[in-house]
DNA sequence: GCGACAG
DNA sequence: ATCTTGTCGC
């Protein structure tokens, strides 16, 4: 596989909006139906988000998209939900008490499309054998990356600190006006990787990358062992550590009583992460290998550079990204 | 200031 | 992630 293909991302917003043009007048579809056409029902909410942000409601008939239980749902274009109902009625759809009358008969789900999401899952499946689990030298510096979203697009930030996470030694941000890929659980990398990759290539070309990079999101804690931290680590061929605030998948291993070591996250037969309590009065974070480091080392390093809940480099990157995005 | 909880 | 405001506790 060509490395460059790992960072190519389809314009899913455009794909979704163009799919709407296939819905015949006089029929409706559901957010879930559109998601299934993309190749994964998990994208249903993302479809809703794209509808809500549709800037050309005249051109793209998002009023024909309803909830899969037949309820009309929302309409963010002018006139709101009432306008949505009126538009559907004009097209011959019967609506009663906010619900489509003969839903199963007027429901369109026969989309003609080469579904993009299965292809992206294949890319993720191919990443696993490119991950290197190896003992990494104790770092002289650590960095964190994060992405923030605002009215003028998204901003990615890279912040490098000393190896104890006490002093910021370098900051860099990168802005992108239009993010083409919505957030879909399990596909976060395709949303944020283009931004982070651009940013980190710039850093690599100017001052060079820090010894290890903390990423706001999972590494191997992922249904296909291909979270953002792993995807980024493989693309850069560089040590990365994923730190997430919520458990995406897997289960916490019960080691029984008397054990105050970090609990392990198990995904099927593999230990893919650690539940680490970084800050006494906060929830734990979930640490996983991105690339080129060992899990125990990732856990220790996370502890070492965390003053609050999140590793300081990530926290600083979050601040840097947010202040430029807003 | 930071985070849980609300919603 | 963001929309948004506040209370409570450390």
Image (tube, coloured by chain):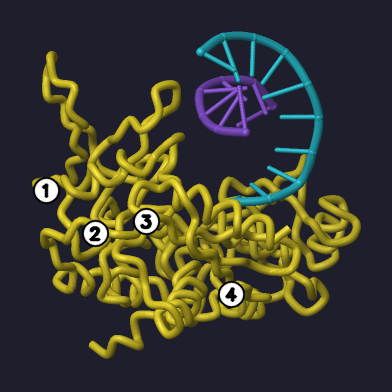
Chain colours: A yellow, B purple, C cyan
Q: On what subunit does the disc labeled 4 rest?
A: A
Q: Are marks 2 and 3 in contact (CB under 8 Å)?
A: no
Which one is nearer the viewer's eye here, C9 or A28?
C9
Q: Residues within 10 Å of mark 4 (few under 14, many from 20)?
A: some
The quarter of the displayed image where residue A246 is located: top left
* Residue A227 seen: no
Which residue has dot 2 on it?
A225
* Dot 1: element: strand
Q: Mark yes or no: residue A275 visible.
A: yes
Going from the N terminus, do you reach mark 2 or mark 4 first?
4
Contact? badges 3 and 4 (CB < 8 Å): no
**Dot label at residue A214:** 3
CA distance separating discs 1 and 2: 10 Å
Q: Is residue A159 above or below residue A298?
A: below
Q: Which tag is nearer the camera, tag 3 or tag 4? A: 3
Mark 3 chain:
A
Query: Mark 3 and mark 1, same subunit?
Result: yes
**How many C-alpha atoms fall within 10 Å of the one at disc 1: few (<14), some, or many (≥20)?**
few
Q: Which residue is mark 1?
A: A270
For label 2, the crowd category at 10 Å Cα-Cα, with few meaning under 14, some 14 to 19 and many 20 or more, is: many
Chain holding disc 2: A
Q: Residue at x 17, y 28 (%)?
A: A261
Is label 3 in contact with label 1 (beta carbons under 8 Å)? no
What's the distance in space between the residues labelled 2 and 4, CA to CA?
A: 24 Å
The quarter of the rendered structure image containing the C terminus of chain A is bottom right
Q: Quadrant of the N terminus of chain A?
A: bottom left
Which residue is pictured at 39% across the width and 46% down the height? A244
* Residue A8, image x, y percentages: 42, 83
Which mark is first along the chain, 3 or 2? 3
Residue A221: x, y in percent?
Answer: 27, 50
Residue identifier under label 4: A180
């Amino acid at each position: 596989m060509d490395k460059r293909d790992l960072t190519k991302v389809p314009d899913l917003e455009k794909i979704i909006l163009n799919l709407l043009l296939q819905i015949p007048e006089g029929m409706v579809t559901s957010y879930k139906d559109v998601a299934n056409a993309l190749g994964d029902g998990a994208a249903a909410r993302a479809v809703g988000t794209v509808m809500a942000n549709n800037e050309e409601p005249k051109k793209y008939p998002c009023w024909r998209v309803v909830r899969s239980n037949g309820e009309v749902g929302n309409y963010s274009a002018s006139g709101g939900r009432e306008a949505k109902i009126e538009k559907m009625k004009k097209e011959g759809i019967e609506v009663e008490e906010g619900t489509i009358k003969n839903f199963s008969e007027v429901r369109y789900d026969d989309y003609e499309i080469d579904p993009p999401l299965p292809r992206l899952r294949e890319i993720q499946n191919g990443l696993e054998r490119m991950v290197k689990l190896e003992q990494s030298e104790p770092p002289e510096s650590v960095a964190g990356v994060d992405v923030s979203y605002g009215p003028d697009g998204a901003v990615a930030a890279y912040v490098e600190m000393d190896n104890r996470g006490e002093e910021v030694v370098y900051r860099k941000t990168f802005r992108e006006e239009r993010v083409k890929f919505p957030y879909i659980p399990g596909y976060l990398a395709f949303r944020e990787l283009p931004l982070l990759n651009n940013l980190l290539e710039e850093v690599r070309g100017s001052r060079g990358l820090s010894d290890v990079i903390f990423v706001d999101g999972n590494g191997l804690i992922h249904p296909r062992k291909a979270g953002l931290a792993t995807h980024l680590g493989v693309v850069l061929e560089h040590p990365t550590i994923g730190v997430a605030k919520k458990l995406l998948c897997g289960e916490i291993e019960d080691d029984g009583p008397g054990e105050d070591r970090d609990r392990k996250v198990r995904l099927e037969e593999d230990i893919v992460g650690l539940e680490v309590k970084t800050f006494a009065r906060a929830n734990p974070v979930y640490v996983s290998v991105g690339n080129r480091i060992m899990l125990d080392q990732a856990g220790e390093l996370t502890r070492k550079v965390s003053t609050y809940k999140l590793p300081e480099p990530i926290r600083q990157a979050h601040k840097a990204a947010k202040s430029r995005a807003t």
